Amino acid sequence: MGKKNKGSTPNLGRQLIKDRFGHTPRRKVDNDTMLHTTELQDGYDWGRLNLSSVTEESSFQAFLRTAELAGTEFQAEKLNITFVNPKQRVGLLSKTQEQRMHQKHVEHRDQLKIPRRPKWSKETSAEELERAENEAFLDWRRDLALLQEDEEILMTPYEKNLEFWRQLWRVVERSDVVVQIVDARNPLLFRSVDLERYVKEVDPSKMNMILVNKSDLLTAEQRRHWAEYFDNEGIRTAFYSATLVEEELKREAEAARHDSFSEVQQLREAAEEIAQSLDKVEDTLDAIERKLKVDKEEKEQLPRLPGDKNSSRLLSRLELIEFLRHIYTGQRHTEQHVTIGMVGYPNVGKSSTINSLMTVKKVSVSATPGKTKRFQTLFLDKDILLCDCPGLVMPSFVLTKADMLLNGILPIDQMRDHVPAVNLLCERIPRHVLEDKYGIVIAKPLEGEDMERPPHSEELLLAYGYNRGFMTSNGQPDQARSARYVLKDYVNGRLLYAMGPPSVPQAEYHTFPERQRKVIEESQLPSQQQRAMRIDKSTSKELDNQFFSNKPNHAHVKGRTNFPHVRLANDGSLVASTDPAAAAAAKPWRHVKKERREKLRKKFSHLDEH
């Protein structure tokens, strides 16, 4: 039977593979070239309110937006690729570079501003005010872009939508006290000094305050250092933990539901006792009155005067409410109540703080900017009005993009390169803390390397991925998936590292616990785990074993090794044996029981080990 005519019946599978992988022209953009281009557009629709938060832009998107604002066209070539070694300090700065960048941050601190609302009056029309706001906002963005370009300074991806800044302007104008909510692990990164200046520019009688959230992650000594630092800065500070308060409220609610039946029984017994004796009722009322007086005296003893120094004590919900009630003594925007403006990054717990104070969910919680579209007012009490501002990412200096990932400014799920962030995490968290926290054994440095160096991202992620069972299709630990879990543990506080004030050395401010688990040598682990812990399997000991191992002295053909008429010469060639017995056995399949055929993938399985 002859071969089929391939031309008459084309192979569908082969054609699909060819269309997908082979003989396909290079992908091109809409203009049929390999160049990025832009066309002039009118920008946002002027007839509608644009409330989509814009913080993170790629270099291409930022260039495109700048070109559109400037009214110019551009062309840029694609496919500029650089390969890096993951065993180096990829994406991190050296000690000298860090010192130089810190010096630049201090020199240009006054240029790190937020946009101001232009001056306006009752005679100013809406069109004129909108035009002035757009021009001022564009000038502000241009100044920050020039600062980044000229001084080569990296900033946080600040909010680039004017509508969000308009919400901030309204909150500042109607608030008596503007509260900046910051993360206790790095308060200076989330604090905007220029916002405090702008509040005083709007009205010198307005007051600034810092609420250090997530303070339960700090020790009492660390909170004392920050209280002293902000005292020297001349700004009131309170320490609070929304997560801790929410957990206490949940426990109280569960206890109340659990004791509801017993409380009903007690009420019935109390009603019977009241009916039997009015004297007992009078005694009970007197006791209640005395208890109310004691509670009132305890509340009056809370620090409430603005002249007091900052306390390092972690405030409860009721204590924070009393603190906000009495902190402002000037002329109020509304006489009936004091207005507290709540401002902060979208990931510092601003919405969680408001929900914990209100005891019910009033604000949607999200780590992504733009969840709260407009500012909203909430009555905490009859004399306290909270004014919630949408989460704003304000411009701030950072060293690297990895620093922004670890501080939760950039979303981890949208991360493209995990190596710099994990390398920075390994430099901050010691090796023994990572091993104790995750119950893993991280590969030790090789011969000739510094034995005290921090682990590379590859070493941590291979050990973590193998321990958790995160494997790729080719049997290697999944480093990208492992990186997301480890980085989220750092952002959530499971891997704790807190930055101290500039007046305290970092080594004294944050100390790590001693090793808890017993040290396990890498040689004590199973061989499969040892191989999975390293991408480069050729260690010096394995190379020595391979070099000095005995060479085989017999032939090997299709799984058969019993060929007595053939021997291996010293030069590695096959020669016929001179032994008569071997010559008689020239045909080994006679009078010899055939060996059981073994599958080759089992025979050579040791070659596929990884």
Image (cartoon, rainbow, N blue to C red):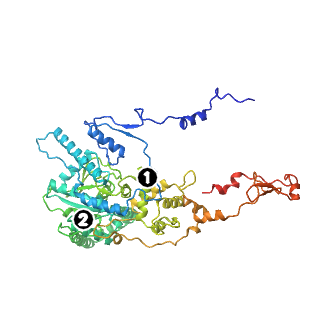
Is residue 524 toward the left or the right of residue 508 in the image? right
Looking at the rendering, in which quadrant would you find the N terminus? top right
> Residue 417 shows which numbered tag?
1
Q: Nearer the viewer, residue 291 or 404?
A: 404
Figure quadrant of residue 582: bottom right
Q: Nearer the viewer, residue 213 or 581?
A: 581
> Residue 610 shows which numbered tag?
none
Q: Which residue is mark 2?
A: 237
* Kind of residue at disc 1: Asp
Q: Nearer the viewer, residue 63 or 473?
A: 63
Q: Position of residue 318 (x, y in %)?
A: 27, 64
Kind of element beneath mark 1:
loop
Circles 2 and 1: CB atoms closer than 8 Å: no
* Kind of residue at disc 2: Thr
Is residue 465 toward the left or the right of residue 232 in the image? right
Instruction: Tell me which numbered mark, 2 or 1, is placed earlier along the sequence.
Output: 2
Q: Position of residue 278 (x, y in %)?
A: 26, 71
Q: Position of residue 122 (x, y in %)?
A: 11, 43
